[in-house]
Image (cartoon, grey):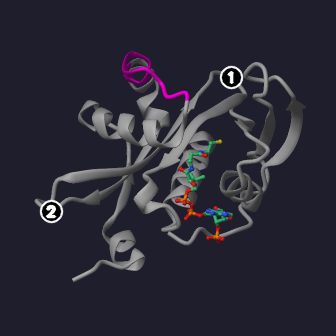
Amino acid sequence: MTSTPTDVRSAACYREPTRADLPDIQLIDAAAFPDRYPFFVLRQLLDAHSRRSVVAVEPGPDYEDKVVGYALTIGEGPRAWLISLAVSPDRRGYGYGRGLLQRSIELCRERVGVDEVLLTVDPKNKPAYELFQSFGFMLREHDERYFGDDEPRDVLAYDLSRPVTRVPRF
Ligand SMILES: CC(C)(COP(=O)(O)OP(=O)(O)OC[C@H]1O[C@@H](n2cnc3c(N)ncnc32)[C@H](O)[C@@H]1OP(=O)(O)O)[C@@H](O)C(=O)NCCC(=O)NCCS
């Protein structure tokens, strides 16, 4: 029997990542970004920031957790940076990106003294751009060489004092 997006979404949850999730996170990262994080960087980012980070998990065939997406947030003081958000290619369009972003914003909201969430996005990355805009992220800055030659990025900002305007699908 084939599972529908609604079936898998209803069996899924969001939680803090653990060390055991790292191989899955690395695979998702490698499939999503040409410049993937080396394993040691991912490991240290998660050790340092797991409490601000989120994984979306589905139950696997033996009811083990299967990570299908992750979001990594870092930063001290009033600004939090969402530095990575990715969903496994075979699970895109199921609502996980929205759920991960929603949970990441909630975690920032729960932390005292955080005023805004910042992120960078390739202006040509339509799925990500539309997701961020649908949440109310606003253009803060465009940098034609943010990550070097031919690597422009828009810096988008989400003001945490704004009310939540859209109910996530998840
Ligand atoms: C961006 C990404 C995380 C979205 O995850 P996802 O689980 O497919 O997204 P969702 O199913 O939750 O969709 C949420 C919203 O994103 C936007 N979106 C998602 N896929 C889209 C597409 N192919 N085209 C346009 N908009 C799209 C829509 O606004 C959508 O809302 P809607 O379903 O109400 O129309 C996913 O495409 C991904 O992992 N991309 C590669 C990594 C990446 O680019 N990360 C962002 C770096 S800044």
Q: Is 169 left, or right, of 55 in this rendering? A: right
Dots 2, 1 in contact, CB < 8 A: no
Marks 2 and 1, the one that precedes in the sequence:
2
Q: Is residue 46 above or below residue 65?
A: above
Residue 61, label in figure: 2
Q: Is residue 138 visible?
A: yes
Q: Is residue 62 magenta?
A: no
Q: Residues within 10 Å of mark 2 (few under 14, many from 20)?
A: few
The magenta stretch is 35-43
Ligand 1 shows up in the quarter that is: bottom right
Q: Is residue 41 magenta?
A: yes
Q: Residue at x 45, y 55 (%)?
A: 89
Residue that mark 1 sits on: 77
Label 2 amino acid? Pro
Horizontal and vertical percent position of residue 157: 79, 41
Q: Residue at x 78, y 20 (%)?
A: 149
Q: Residue at x 79, y 44 (%)?
A: 123
Q: Secondary structure at mark 1?
A: loop
Identify which residue, 111 or 158, lies in the foreground: 158
Q: Residue at x 34, y 78 (%)?
A: 7
Residue 116, label in figure: none
